[in-house]
Amino acid sequence: MEKQFLVLIPARFGSTRFPGKPLVKILDKPMIQHVYERASQVFEHVYIATDDERIVNTVEKFGGRVVTTAETHQSGTDRCAEALRKVEVATGKSFDVVINVQGDEPFIATDQLQLITSCFDVGDTDIATLVKRIDKQTDLFDVNKPKVILNKRHQAIYFSRTPIPYMRSKEESQWLHNHVYYKHIGMYAYKSAILKEITLLPQGNLEKAEALEQLRWIENGFTIAVKETDTENMAIDTPADLKYVESVLKERGL
C-alpha cells in the first residue's frame, strides 16, 4: 500500500536573529508562501504549523492550510509532533511519514522533497535527512553548518558542529583534499509513530554539548537514514541572508 506523507512547515514569528522572518516578502510573496507552494508541488497534504496569529492570517489569506500550535515548543520537531496530532484529528486521516520542511528556504528544491521520501523504501528507517558534500573550506569550519558522519549503510552515526573526522596527519587546508566531508541539510522525515516517541525523550549529554537535537535520537538508538543531494540550499537565517538571496534573484532577472 502506498505510504501517506504529511508535510509540516514549522514557522515562528519571534526568531531572535530575524523577527518576523516567515512574513518577509520575496518576489512579492511572503517567504512562508514560497515554501508552502514548493512543497505542494510534490505532496497533497501540506500544513504550516505556527503559534502566531499574524502567520495564521497570512496563510489563510493566500489559501494555505495552517494549524495552530503551542508557544512553548523548543524545536521544530516538537511543533511538528503537536501539529501531526491536530491534523489527524481534524482530517480523520492517518499518515505514515511526516516531513519537516524548514520555513526559511523559499526556493527549496522539489527533488530534495522527493529524495527524502525514498529513504522509507527501506523498512528499518526511523528518521531520514539529507546531506551535501562540502566543497568549501569556510563551510567545513562553520559551526552553524553541522557536519555528519555516515556508516556504510548511509545512516548517520554522528553530527557535530566541528569538522569530523579530525585529520591528524594533515594540515587543515588539506582536509577537503584527503577526505569526503558532508554537511547536514536541515530537512527531516519521521515515521509518525517515531515522531511522537522522540519528542518525549529527555535531552541527552551529546545534545546538550553540541546543541543538536539529532544527537538525542542517535543516543537513544534510532536509525537515521541519509540521502546525498547536490543542490545548494538558500536558507535565510538573518537579514544579511535575505540581502544575498535578493542579489542572486536580481542576477537571474527575477
Image (cartoon, helix red, strand yellow):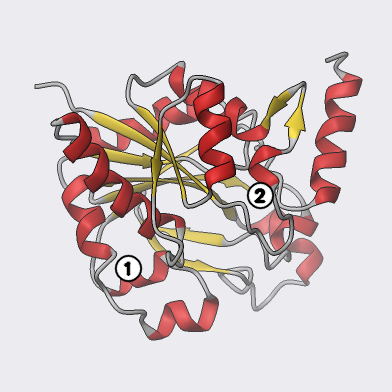
The x and y percentages for residue 185 are 55, 47
Q: Circle 1 — which element?
A: helix
75 left or right of 190?
A: right
Which of disc 1 and disc 2 is earlier in sequence?
A: 2
As drawn, the label of residue 134 is 2
Q: Nearer the viewer, residue 149 or 33?
A: 33
Residue at 57% x, 61% y: name it: 147
Does the CB distance between marks 2 and 1 fall below 8 Å? no
Quadrant of the frame with the C terminus: top right
Q: Based on the displayed image, in which of its 4 quarters is residue 172 positioned?
A: bottom right
Q: Amino acid at mark 1?
A: Ile
Which mark lies nearer to you, 2 or 1? 1
37 left or right of 249?
A: left
170 left or right of 100?
A: right
The x and y percentages for residue 69 are 39, 52
The x and y percentages for residue 124 are 17, 48
Quadrant of the frame with the N terminus: top left
**Residue beneath label 1, please?**
218
Would residue 229 be visible to someone looking at this image? no
Would residue 67 be visible to someone looking at this image? yes
The x and y percentages for residue 70 are 40, 59
Residue at 81% x, 64% y: name it: 173
Q: Amino acid at mark 2?
A: Ile
Q: Nearer the viewer, residue 35 or 165?
A: 35
Q: Nearer the viewer, residue 150 or 2?
A: 2
Tell me if residue 20 comes above or below residue 163 in the rendering. above
Cα gap from disc 2 to disc 1, whole angstroms: 22 Å
Are there few (<14), some (14-19), or many (20+) residues within 10 Å of tag 2? Answer: some
Q: Nearer the viewer, residue 252 or 165?
A: 252
Residue at 45% x, 55% y: name it: 76
